Image (cartoon, rainbow, N blue to C red):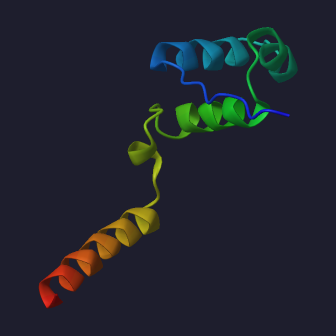
Amino acid sequence: MPKQQRRTFTTEFKKQMVGLYENGKSRAALVEEYGLTASALDRWIKQAQATGSFKEKDNRSSEENELIALQKENQRLKMEVD
């Protein structure tokens, strides 16, 4: 069974799907009608409610941001040693 091609969706489309959900359209109906995955729709709804942004960097926790900063610092220090 061939692997499905990864699709990308615009911010406007994501906002439209969240809006439809918030206006009473069921999750199952949206998933079936637009060919989405339930997990993607759930993630968009969660992101819209939490920050109003669909960008991953806007939805990171402070711990995730700190981890990324530490990884960058670690990489920089490794390069200095070499």
20 is higher (above) or lower (below) than 55: above
Which of the pair 47/31 is nearer the observer?
31
Which residue sits furthest left? 80
- On the image, the x and y values in percent for residue 37 come to 76, 29
Is the residue 18 above or below the residue 16 in the image? Answer: below
Q: Is residue 19 left or right of residue 30?
A: left
Compared to residue 79, the image places residue 10 above or below, namely above
Residue drawn at x 58%, y 12% as measured from the top left: 16
Give me the residue at 54% from left, 24% from top: 8
6, 43: nearer the viewer: 6
Res 66 quadrant in image? bottom left
Q: Is residue 68 left or right of residue 73?
A: right
- Residue 42 % position (x, y): 71, 35
Tell me what residue is drawn at x 13 percent, y 84 percent.
80
Q: How many marks?
A: 0
> Above or below — where is 3 with respect to 66?
above
Q: Picture quarter containing residue 41?
A: top right
Quadrant location of residue 20?
A: top right
Q: Quadrant of the C terminus?
A: bottom left
Q: State the image coordinates of residue 62 (x, y, percent, origin top left).
A: 41, 63
Check the image and name the residue furthest to the front: 2
The single residue placed furthest to the bottom in the displayed view is 81
* Residue 75 percent coordinates (x, y): 27, 76
Q: In the displayed structure, does residue 27 sit left or right of residue 53?
A: right
**Residue shown at the point (86%, 34%) measured from the top left:** 1
